[in-house]
Amino acid sequence: MKNIVILISGGGSNMAAIARTAQRDGWRKAYDAQVAAVISNRPDAKGLALARESLIATEVVDHTAFDSREAFDAELAAVIDRRNPSLVVLAGFMRILTPGFVERYRGRLLNIHPSLLPAFPGLHTHQRALDAGCKVGGATVHQVTSDLDHGPILEQAVVPVLPGDTAETLAARVLTQEHLIYPQTIARLLPTL
Ligand code: GAR
């Protein structure tokens, strides 16, 4: 069985979209794959409840309990590895990962970022796109490398910036596309794993 482990920090809407697609499209039969666990670095992440509703195992590795990134990443990797993962999927996971962690999962570590990379890596992407006068925004699914938000691009979705957009309205428009391209990209990768 190809186990997919999803890491979240917040709302978990991308995680839920992946779990929903896996269920709807029968990834178990089609690819011998399943969402094996959802792990959050925040005990209060709303996405944990969503995962439990979908009967997906959840774990919390609270980053505030560790005094270094290395110690947190070591425990995170131990919890992930118990699930024997074929794919580790960052879905709104808001922690910078150490090079050692990234290397451990090289080639099977994905992220979604709410901009058209390489434009606007980092935080506050939508406000920065609006401030720059961009006519389009979007999202990028990419392989994770130790260069933050710069790994090889696997998929992108583009949305228009509309008159009167705020960071919130643009984020919501981009998010609906994230919910499509992230599951699609994973489904495309699964046969190759
Ligand atoms: C998504 O927009 C995702 O692209 C972004 O956080 C949001 C999480 O939403 N990720 C990053 O900014 C990573 N740098 P969700 O928890 O509802 O999936």
Image (cartoon, rainbow, N blue to C red):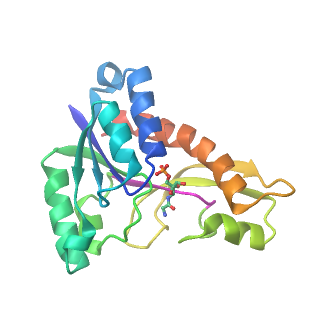
Residue at the front extreme of this rendering: 44
Q: Image check: 27 left or right of 153?
A: left
How many tags in the picture?
0
Instruction: Please give the name of the residue rendered at 62% of the width and 67% of the height, measured from the top-left corner.
Output: 125
The answer to whether 120 is drawn above or below residue 185 in the figure is below
- Asked whether residue 98 is in view, the answer is yes
Q: Position of residue 41 (x, y in %)?
A: 30, 61
Q: Which residues are magenta?
A: 109-116
Q: Image check: 46 left or right of 59?
A: right
Instruction: Please give the name of the residue rendered at 60% of the width and 69% of the height, measured from the top-left corner.
Output: 124
Instruction: Please give the name of the residue rendered at 71% of the width and 53% of the height, measured from the top-left corner.
Output: 169
Q: Image check: 150 left or right of 46?
A: right
Q: Position of residue 10 (x, y in %)?
A: 42, 55
Residue 112 in magenta stretch: yes
Residue 125 in magenta stretch: no
The answer to whether 68 is drawn above or below residue 90 in the figure is below
- Asked whether residue 188 is in view, the answer is no
The answer to whether 155 is drawn above or below residue 70 in the figure is above
Frontmost residue, 26 versus 126? 126
Which quadrant, please, contains the C terminus? Answer: top left
Q: Position of residue 19 (x, y in %)?
A: 39, 33
The prevailing secondary structure element of the residues shown in magenta is strand
Which quadrant, please, contains the N terminus? Answer: top left
Frontmost residue, 139 versus 38? 38
Specify the quadrant of the image occupied by residue 74.
bottom left
Instruction: Please give the name of the residue rendered at 35% of the width and 25% of the height, measured from the top-left corner.
Output: 27
The answer to whether 183 is drawn above or below residue 167 in the figure is above
Residue at the right extreme of this rendering: 163
Q: Position of residue 48 (x, y in %)?
A: 33, 45
